[in-house]
């Protein structure tokens, strides 16, 4: 039997009809708010902020990451088990500050105003520190995921699905091998593009070599010990890294390429913010955690500016009757464990966007 639900607001009239696992959204296009109205409000807010607020705050966090990394290296040389474990965790945390927060922002052109310097920092954070290809990151994330967010087969986060792996293994065990397979995935993805592959091999190898030298000279590991501890420390946050990549899109509206909605409707219905998390917000960035909706609407803004525009975006979407999804990390994790088969194994239901003139 068909399940019908009608939702009416002051600005958007939406009929959601579910039949056979598929959903149709009938939306009055003339009631949808214009994206340029929100853009004008955001640009006006941005114009009132200084360079420090636009970029400096995030560079300060990265600077603290450098300090924290050397503290972690020093602590790992201690005979104290507690200090050693603290050092491993701190070193891994700071690695995420560079590779995830820094790499993600630089890939979007959000660490400085210059296009060339953003390219440089993207290569530095993604390849030299993160051991992944900046070229592939740009193709997968910038050119595919963002313009095609939650469009089946294009930007639907399917990269992170492994339906052959049981729920608890996928959620809490297999992410631990991500640091090991990351450079291998990059090599496989670049195979045949020899110029990009050569650059990646040179830059990533140099980054790993310096990382090994730091662990050998400051933390007093042998070469093999340095290699092992590099990947152990990088696995520190690999579980939440995989989690946030699926929590904020999968389970929300998924559209077919033939019935994709307007951008503001696509992002408001297909993106979710996690609650402020003072562990993950600073190593992954606000744009990945608590301001993911804002980031998808304005991907070239720095993490700090995504946080600044959050109240404005939230008010705009809610005022116009559009969803503004938020949930906390633990609630989302429990939901995915319980609904793993429906969310990660079966094909997601398709939402058909039907615009009514």
Image: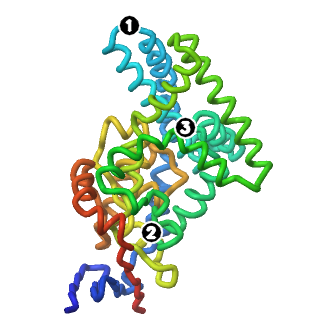
Residue ID for mark 2: 150
Q: Residue 118, percent across and down?
A: 65, 43
Point 63% across, 44% down: residue: 113
Q: Can residue 61 be seen?
A: no
Q: Nearer the viewer, residue 274 or 300?
A: 274
Q: Earlier in the sequence, mark 3 or mark 2?
A: 3
SS at badge 1 = loop
Labels 1, 2: front one: 1
Residue ID for mark 1: 79
Q: Is residue 79 left or right of residue 198?
A: left
Residue ID for mark 3: 51
Asked if the residue under mark 3 is in contact with the one under mark 1, i.e. CB atoms within 8 Å, the reply is no
Badge 1 density bin: few <14, some 14–19, many ≥20, Cα 10 Å = few
Point 69% across, 53% down: residue: 190
Labels 3, 2: front one: 2
Point 41% across, 83% down: residue: 353
| Looking at the image, residue 339 lies above or below residue 121 | below
Q: Residue 47, percent across and down?
A: 52, 49
Q: Nearer the viewer, residue 262 or 198?
A: 198
Q: Can residue 131 be seen?
A: yes
Which quadrant, please, contains the C terminus?
bottom left
| Looking at the image, residue 34 lies above or below residue 40 | below
Q: State the separation of the CA atoms marked 3 and 2.
A: 33 Å
Q: State the separation of the CA atoms marked 1 and 2.
A: 49 Å
Which quadrant, please, contains the N terminus?
bottom left
Point 60% across, 42% down: residue: 183
The answer to which quarter of the image holds residue 142 is bottom right
């Amino acid at each position: 039997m068909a399940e019908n639900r009608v939702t009416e607001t002051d600005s958007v009239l939406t009929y959601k009809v579910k039949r056979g696992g598929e959903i149709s959204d009938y939306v009055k296009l003339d009631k949808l708010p214009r994206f340029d109205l929100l853009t004008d409000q955001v640009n006006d807010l941005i114009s009132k902020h200084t360079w420090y607020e636009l970029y400096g705050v995030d560079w300060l966090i990265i600077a603290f990451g450098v300090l924290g990394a050397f503290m972690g290296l020093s602590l790992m040389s201690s005979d104290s088990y507690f200090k050693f474990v603290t050092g491993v965790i701190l070193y891994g945390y700071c690695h995420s500050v560079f590779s995830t927060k820094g790499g993600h922002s630089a890939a979007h052109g959000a660490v400085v105003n210059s296009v060339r310097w953003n390219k440089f920092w993207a290569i530095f954070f993604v390849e030299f520190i993160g051991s992944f290809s900046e070229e592939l990151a740009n193709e997968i994330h910038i050119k595919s995921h963002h313009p095609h967010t939650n469009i089946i087969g294009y930007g639907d986060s399917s990269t992170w699905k492994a339906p052959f792996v049981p729920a608890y293994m996928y959620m809490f065990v297999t992410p631990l091998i991500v640091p090991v397979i990351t450079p291998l995935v990059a090599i496989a993805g670049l195979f045949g593009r020899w110029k990009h592959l050569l650059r990646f091999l040179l830059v990533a190898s140099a980054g790993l070599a310096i990382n090994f030298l730091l662990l050998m000279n400051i933390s007093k590991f042998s070469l093999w010990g340095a290699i092992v501890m590099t990947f152990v420390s990088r696995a520190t946050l690999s579980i939440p890294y995989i989690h946030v990549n699926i929590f904020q899109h999968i389970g929300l509206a998924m559209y077919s390429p033939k019935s994709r909605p307007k951008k503001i409707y696509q992002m408001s219905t297909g993106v979710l913010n996690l609650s402020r998390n003072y562990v993950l917000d600073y190593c992954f960035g606000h744009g990945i955690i608590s301001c993911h909706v804002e980031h998808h609407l304005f991907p070239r803004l720095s993490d700090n500016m995504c946080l600044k525009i959050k109240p404005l975006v939230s008010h705009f979407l809610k005022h116009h009757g559009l969803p503004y999804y938020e949930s906390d990390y633990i609630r989302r994790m429990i939901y995915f464990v319980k609904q793993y088969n429906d969310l990660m194994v079966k094909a997601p239901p398709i939402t058909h966007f039907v615009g009514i003139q």
